[in-house]
Amino acid sequence: MISSSELKKRVERLHLSMECEGIESLLVSNPKNVGYLTGKETGRILLSKDQDTLWTRELYTEMHSDLYFGKGYPFEVAVYEKDAVKRKIADLGIENIAVENMPFLKYENTCKELGMKVLVSEIVEWQRAVKTVEEMEMLGKSARIAVNAMEKAYDVVREGVREIDALAEIEYEIRMRGSDSPPFNDGMLLSSGKDSADIHARAGRRKIKSPSTVVVDLGGRYSGYYSDMTRTLEVGRIDAKEKDLLLFVDDLRARAIDMIREGMKAGDLHSFVEKEMEKKGYKFFHGSGHGVGLEVHEFPSIARDSADVLKDGMVFTIEPGIYIPGKMGVRFEDMVLLKNGKARILTR
């Protein structure tokens, strides 16, 4: 369980950001953001200069009473009732309120519920992008689960084995290593031969052939924090051109990680990867990476035209990939922590 002192630091940090951005009050309902700030992914939060309130079901106030009513907990906890948020906003005299980025229909319904127009802000998501020491520890443990699972992949991915059978053994290893859930909740990716050219191909009942390449994309989840890594495995003796492609993509991954520096634009990092692929005669069909934390994909975005700036404390992936329809796909991915101005690989 996350300590109240850690939660208090997160809330204080958020208030400073709100003040800097001129946000008077903030309504939070996204379960991941609620969990980040309160320790549990349930309820709604209203943060203001006068009071921070968490509304949740009566059942959860009883279940999590040790946390909610413990020393130093940063929220006033109340049982949710209809119009409770609207009444609190009126009682505190709040005139301007911000909410998270949300689907348009939910935004419209929130405005109707509160009886006022609201601003949209990604302030919580951007705070989550820079990890605390405690979060770095959780992500490191999650990454270790992924590394151990990948070692298992090298053992079970072989000629004659069905993709789904190899996947089952690897996912079993992931859960046995302590993962909160299957990889990415929906399960890992594993595809062989020409099917590996599909970026998000799922394992099928096909038997793995030799020679062929097999893309294995997996991760763990420890105390709510995800990990993500990919390797392209060789089964049998692949031809020289295919081998050259594997070495090129793996080397490009390493070179991209080596050039990461605090303060650089994520879009510039992606441009480097994309241009190197174009020199080789290939197109790049997805981003070069993404932030990892309480969600598998979060800020920053390492993609074309991304203006996101890389900062110390960020954890993200680097994942160049080349895909040749009807033949093969190659992807190598590592999760890195940007610390003291440079990237440190967590998935090795």
Image (spheres, rainbow, N blue to C red):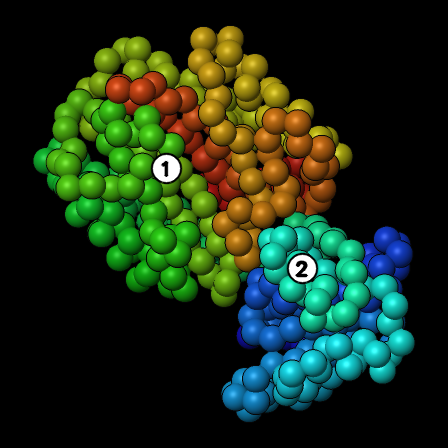
Residue type at mark 1?
Answer: His
| Whole-percent x, y for residue 295 in the image | 53, 54
Q: Quadrant of the N terminus?
A: bottom right
| Whole-percent x, y for residue 4 in the image | 68, 77
Compared to 210, does 231 lie above or below?
A: below
On the rendered structure, is 160 left or right of 109? left
Tag 1 near tag 2, CB within 8 Å = no
Quarter-of-image position of residue 51: bottom right
| Residue at 63% from the left image edge and 67% from the top image edge | 29
| Residue at 26% from the left image edge and 57% from the top image edge | 172
Q: Nearer the viewer, mark 1 or mark 2?
A: 2
The circle drawn on residue 200 is 1
**Camera sees residue 157:** yes
- Name the one closer to the observer, 276 or 153: 276
Compared to 238, does 286 lie above or below?
A: below
| Whole-percent x, y for residue 7 in the image | 69, 71
Quarter-of-image position of residue 91: bottom right
Compared to 134, does 305 lie above or below?
A: above
The circle drawn on residue 108 is 2
- Name the one closer to the observer, 293 or 108: 108
| Residue at 67% from the left image edge and 59% from the top image edge | 108
